[in-house]
Image: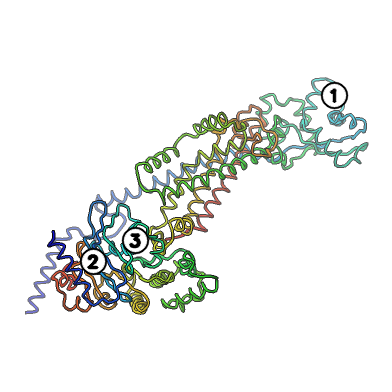
Amino acid sequence: MVKNMNAEKKKTENVAECGLENIRMKTQNLSVFYNNDQALHDINLDIACNKVTALIGPSGCGKSTFMRCLNRMNDYVEGCRVTGKVRLDGFNIYKDNVDTILLRQKVGMVFQKPNPFPKSIYENVAYGPKIHHLIENKDELDALVEKTLKRVGLWDEVADRLSAPGTSLSGGQQQRLCIARAIATKPEVVLMDEPCSALDPIATARIEELIAELEQKFTIVIITHSMQQAERVSDHTAFFHMGHIIEAGDTQKIFNDPEHQKTKDYIGGKFG
Amino acid sequence: MIKIFERRTRIAMNRVKKKKSPFIYKSYSKKPKHKWLRKRNAQEQRFKRTGVFCILIAFFFLASLVWNIFSNGYSAFTEAQINLPVEFQAELIEDDAYRKIIQNSLLELFPGIEDRKEKRELFSLISRNAPHILEKIVEEDPTVIGRKSMVWIPASSAVSIFYKQHLYEQAKRSGKISTSQVAWVTDLARTQNMRLKFNATFFKNGDSREAEQAGVLASTIGSFMTILVCIAMAFPLGVATAIYLEEFARKSWFTDFIEININNLAAVPSIIFGLLGLSIYLNIFGLPRSSSLVGGMVLALLILPVIVIATRNALQAVPPSIRYAAAALGATPTQVVFHHTLIYALPGIMTGVILSIARAFGETAPLLMIGMVAFIADVPKTFTDPATTLPVQVYLWANNPELGFVEKTAAAIMVLLTFMVLINLLAIYIRRRFEIKW
């Protein structure tokens, strides 16, 4: 028992040692249970400020569960129980008195399938700022919508049809609209759950460019099944397997010189 | 070396071909040689023909229903009128003896009738409402007093039907019209003193003991007032229940229990809701009998489970990803419902609500239980006035043995069906126009 704990301490230290100076989010002994099945086992991971952290691993390894812990979307899953701590800027978001609504403003999320609201493009972007009272008047809102759409590179394509429904856009445009919607609430962290899995290579390239741009302002956590994508866009990578973190650290190191055999096998395509 | 390899491959492929496809289609004709293929084609044909046959049967019944109603009812939209030379005698008008004026002009038209029985037959050519019509004419234009003019007066129901011809045999057999009356009417028709006019009375009057004066206005207004109460009660209750069950309630044995009960309630015979209304609304709450208020409240109970189920289905049709998207933006559960889920489900909810209202509109049995089966001649003015509804009016008229009410019944059914079709068209329109495709 004591040995185990020591081993975990060492692991935590290892992760902490891999050059993360500015830590935005930090999980400590995070375990997640669905009814009686444990999906995550004592996860300790640090997420660096204004960097892209990629979560890789085979299906069912707990990446999405982990991501949902970061903005407490797990609350919506019935039978889900979380133990351990998740700290955002040092503050444990699993305390009893945390307002999850305010938390989700700070930790935005982009989903696997583009899911714009069946409202106008303008409304899609403006919705978050409106409900959080981030804007004072209509002009400010207009400016914010324009700024946000420009940031995701959608402004030129939709400027003349802001009142068209968001669902009328193409898949790649929809996903960029969803990203715009997520960053319009001025979050600190943006979680992306396989944002490109439903898109073609061109749209994917577009989103990847966007991620690189957004990195300067936001802390991004991205789940991906594409090793190339993880290598291209991320600064840090965490490899999940069966609810454990096998290896986490600098992306270059993980991809070029992984410590664990499993990581090597997964990245090399031997299983997964 | 390569050649050998190629040959071997070819041999191997041939072998595979022979082995793997023992059956090759030689022709693609529709009359195949193989018995099982013929059987399969026959099966397809049989299934298609059965479907067409079923549709034809359903269509036959629908067509005969519509034809039956229409052929019985279309004549109710016209009424026969007789052109009478009316002398507005001042002294008779002063005495309010309009009936006497009518009788005089009839006697003037057919002089030489002395027999008392014959006189009575003659007077019954004209609607019993005729004196009121004269009274109205005098009220509107007092200058007619003392003058003589031709006035079109509605004929009595029996004469009207006889004149419209299509119920002649029944009219004679039931003894509603006598031989001399037939002669008079034939005479009037020959001299063009009889005509068919659009029957505005049918849309202006409430119920009446006299068939030619009975109309659907009171029952139509009653129907709409009842439905109004019904919507006002069932819509908020049903939608709120569904939203709570679907969006907020945590799954437990209790919500399961409620769900089972709601589904069962939707299948409860409607008359039982009538009994429930009788015992609760009338006996315990003491609400006014046979009023549209109570009628609407009973119908609200009846369609409440249907609305709950329709609303839940509409809410379920909104993909969960939309809910998560809103929640991940930091919308509270209430905001998620009122800014998103409910808005996107609204077309579906409206369709369900409108269809259940169509059901309530045609409901009769529970209303009989709370006394809406009363004879209502006046248009109800408030929700507590005694009222009746269109289907109940149909039921009442259908029970009336008098001949004139046969066509009235069919005509009232036509009015009822028209409203039904309109309601359903509205539902279809809303579904087509506002439906969101995911």
Q: Nearer the viewer, residue B348 or B30?
A: B348
Q: Is residue A155 left or right of residue B101?
A: left
Look at discs 1 and 2 and give the one toward the viewer.
Answer: 2
Q: Amino acid at mark 3?
A: Arg
Chain of residue at mark 1: B
Q: Is residue B246 above or below residue A193?
A: above
Res. B113 mark: 1
Look at discs 2 and 3 and give the one toward the viewer.
Answer: 2
Q: Position of residue B279 (x, y in %)?
A: 53, 29
| SS for dot 1 | loop
Q: Position of residue B348 (x, y in %)?
A: 48, 53
Check whether the beta carbons of the residues at disc 1 and disc 2 lie within 8 A of each other: no
> Residue at 77% of width from left, 36% of height from top?
B154
| SS for dot 2 | strand
Res. A72 mark: 3
Q: Is residue B290 above or below residue A133?
A: above
Q: Position of residue B261 (x, y in %)?
A: 41, 38
